[in-house]
Amino acid sequence: MQNNNRDRESNHSSSSSHPHSTVMNMRDKERYIEDFNFPYCDLTGKYEKVAKIGQGTFGLGEIKKVVQQLLNGLYYIHSNKILHRDMKAANVLITKNGVLKLADFGLARAFSSTKNGLPNRFTNRVVTLWYRPPELLLGERNYGPPVDLWGAGCIMAEMWTRSPIMQGNSEQQQLTLISQLCGSITPQVWPGVEHLELFKKMELPHKQKRKVKERLTPYLKDPYACDLLDKLLVLDPSKRADSDTALNHDFFWTDPMPCDLGKMLANHTQSMFEFLAPPRRATQMRHHSMPRPAPSTVQDSGYQDRVF
């Protein structure tokens, strides 16, 4: 069953008008951690909890609700000219009532339109490596909301795979993994990419075909989910779906519809972060390149070397 486009637009526009429903100050997150009375679980912790207790993963309707809230959060901050710049599963929190919060705005920056002014000149050394979009890996400094949407796509895929889908140990390897999944990075598929600072300095794989749907279908098993991911994990940022377009995708408007997370979370009384989230060091929060986990860490956290 599908709703009309007017219903779609009014739904996410109204739900994204309240910042506190989807955006959480990092100081609040730290305070809860210090008190050990943590009413939020991050998505990495959630995966482990569900997997270890043997009750399966999120249902499709629940995944839709998580991703919908995630995109609503991005819609809100982007509408207010803010970039998050560190989208990853560990920065997506869910309250015990099933409300999703975007956290850790330590790397967030205000951005402006470049149509009537000078281009933005941001650092490209942001976003945890496994979630970093190709334009940043190639040295782009004049970027905008598409960098967050790439991360949202990676997080969405992770809802099924339960580990990051591209786990490079260097910028070079990350670009290789991206090319193997999304196709070769060329001016034909991404006009103007040849002008980026690192385009000629990186060894970019040739003759790679785009395989997003092919490789993710065995995990997702939902054609609408695969199609939405195919629109989020686009090499050319100017062609990548924005949050408004993504929220109007059929993925959210076909059965099963996004459903409340409260009932599922009510079955879990322990803090999933406190007991099962991957261990973190104080300096890890702002690492620009995440190293490949050691074998013991991979085993403890549930992360694989890579999905593909």
Image: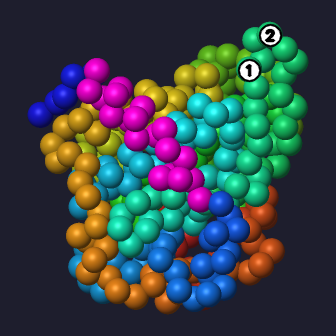
Quadrant of image for the N terminus = top left
Q: Position of residue 218 (x, y in %)?
A: 30, 53
Q: What is the three-letter code of the residue carrying label 2?
A: Asn
Q: Residue at left 84%, top 37%?
A: 122
Q: Residue at left 40%, top 88%?
A: 270
Q: What is the three-letter code of the residue carrying label 1?
A: Ser
Q: Which residues are magenta?
A: 6-24
Question: Up-down: is 249 above or below 20?
Answer: above
Q: Position of residue 195 (x, y in %)?
A: 82, 21
Asked if the residues shown at circle 1 and circle 2 are in contact, with their CB atoms under 8 angstroms apart, the answer is yes
| Secondary element at image label 2 | loop
Circle number at residue 113 = 1
Q: Is residue 70 left or right of residue 305?
A: left
Magenta span includes 79: no
Query: Looking at the image, can residue 274 be seen?
Result: yes
Query: Looking at the image, can residue 209 be seen?
Result: no
Q: Residue at left 36%, top 64%?
A: 98
Q: Position of residue 28 (x, y in %)?
A: 64, 69
Q: Residues within 10 Å of mark 1 (few under 14, many from 20)?
A: few
Main SS category, magenta section: helix
| Secondary element at image label 1 | loop
Q: Position of residue 32 (x, y in %)?
A: 60, 79
The quadrant in which residue 53 appears is: bottom left
| Nearer to the camera, 76 or 161 | 76
Q: Residues within 10 Å of mark 2 (few under 14, many from 20)?
A: few
Question: Up-down: is 69 above or below 271?
Answer: above
Residue indicated by mark 2: 116
Q: CA distance from mark 1 to mark 2?
A: 7 Å
| Nearer to the camera, 206 or 126 | 126
Q: Residue at left 33%, top 34%?
A: 11
